[in-house]
Structures are given as structure tokens and as C-alpha cells.
Image: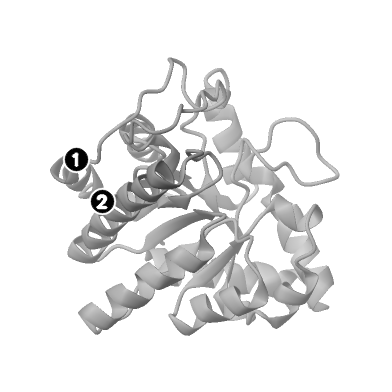
Amino acid sequence: MLIDTHSHLNFNAYKEDQREVIERALNNNIWMINVGSQYQTSQRAVEISQQYSQGVFSAVGLHPIHLETGLVKIKVDKEEIEMKTQEEDFDYEKYKNLAKNEKVAAIGEFGLDYYWKPKTKKKLEEFKLKQKRVFLKQLELAAELNLPAIFHCRFAHSDLIALLDDFLKDRKKTIRGVVHCFTGNWPEAKRYLEMGLYLGFNGLIFKLDFEEIIKRVPLERILIETDCPYLTPPPMTGRNEPMFVKYIAEKIAEIKKINFEKIAESTTDNAKNLFLIN
């Protein structure tokens, strides 16, 4: 058994064959968590999960690239949503009500993303501040509902670590969650692990050099994911899907010199323990 801990079958890329893709995975004993990026895709993720008695779960959250800042132009992704996506302000109560559904396993994905950013120093500071404020609101929501968090982080690990450190000091408690699609260095990975977080790996491990990091991360803190429809792992091409998570497990097994069955067992246990799914 395998669990794809970060998929987006709630995206427009699967409009025509969503059910077939899900059933193909389930028939091969692969479970999945469909992750929201804004309210509409979060709602869709919940609706999909309600159609299955087992193996399909959801997460709800506002991705930082969809945050209303008025400072950058949003990149429209035809794979994500059918209509032109709109910038969104985070409505705490609205997301809270959606997240109370029994098939919601996490709050996410949310976090920090400094890839598309303003060019002036003043606007950049304002841009980062708005992302941080909404990040903390969603972290509070996860804490209130006792749900794990799925963190997105791109070109912002130092700021994310600082926010989490401050949150832990203020709350004097742990944070349950995963840094999905981990792209940081070893000192950053080590800090996340010290906080009790998991690290999620996907098709990027075939494109970037994460071998030493994967060797050093304890197996009991690794999650596998596809981030489909993106980041398709070789030998597959085209649109990614949960079935392909097996290639991530195989690559990690190769790097760690552990048999595939052990990787499958451990990452499945990790996912079940973090997201409390069964």
C-alpha cells in the first residue's frame, strides 16, 4: 500500500477523467489526499472525498499565490481551475466550516511563496507581511481544529522557520504537519525535523540533487507525494497522477538502500499517523 499525501485531482486537469484516475489508484491500493489551493478547489476536494468510503481524503487551505495582496499579478494556471482564478482574502470562518467535514485530513496547502514578487523594496516588504499574516491565521485554524498543516514553501524557508519558531515559543506546544515538496538544504531540513515536522518528497528528487538530504532524513519522517498534475516522475511523461507515487518510493528506496516494501510500509504508517486516516 502507498499513500499519495499531496495530489490535486480537484484541479481542472482531471475534469474529464477524475473518477477513472482515482479508481485506477484505489485498485492498485494507493490512497490519496486531494489538497486545496483556494476556496473553490478546497470545496471541490471535500466533495470528491465524500464520494468514497475509503482511500480518498481532502485538505483545505489558501495557497499564498492566490492571496489578495494587490501587489503582484496572479499567474493563471489552466491546469488548476477552469475559470480565471481570482485573488482571494482568507475568510477564517468560511474555511473553518469547510474544514469541519469528517473527510478533511489537514489544513493546507498554505505557506510562503516568494517566487512571483514585487520589484520594489517597499512593496516586497508589504507583500511578505501579508503572506505571513495569512499564514499565521491558517496555522491558528489548524491548531483550533486539531488538524495537521500542509506547508508550501518556495524561496522562503528562512522566513517560514522563523514564523514556526515564534509560534512554538508563544504556544509552548508542538506543530503537526509536513513541509510538502521540500526544496531546502540540510540545515533547513534539520530544523523542520527538530520541530517534529515531516518532509514530503515528489518528482523533484529526480531533477534536483536531494540524495544526501534523503539519506539523512529518518525514514519515519518521510512522506511521499506526487503534487499531480505537476512534477511527473520518470519514466512517465505528461500529466502526473497518484499511481505514479510508486516511482517516488522506488527512488527513495534506491537512495537509502532499503527495499521498496519497507519504504511503502513506513511512508504509509507515517501518513496514517500524521493525518489520522484509516
From this view, report whether residue 248 is shown above or below residue 118.
below
Residue plotted at (43% across, 15% down): 83
Where residue 247 sits, quadrant-wise, is bottom right
Report, in whole angstroms, how far the alpha carbon at label 1 lies from the one at label 2. 20 Å
Residue 140 rendering spot, x and y as whole percentages: 22, 61
Indicate which label's residue lies in the foreground, 1 or 2: 1
Query: Mark 1: which amino acid?
Result: Asp
Which residue is under mark 1? Answer: 91
Query: Mark 2: which amino acid?
Result: Glu
Residue plotted at (62% across, 44% down): 242
Front residue (pair 257, 214): 214
Can residue 186 be seen in this snapshot?
yes
Residue plotted at (64% across, 60% down): 183
Residue 277 rendering spot, x and y as whole percentages: 40, 61
Residue 65 rendering spot, x and y as whole percentages: 44, 38
Image quadrant where one finds the C terminus: bottom left
From this view, report whether residue 196 is shown above or below residue 233.
below
What element does badge 2 sit on? loop
Residue plotted at (51% across, 34% down): 9
- The extreme top residue here reads 83
Front residue (pair 181, 157): 157
Q: Relative to residue 198, is residue 183 drawn left or right?
A: right
Which residue is under mark 2? Answer: 102
From this view, report whether residue 103 is shown above or below residue 257.
above
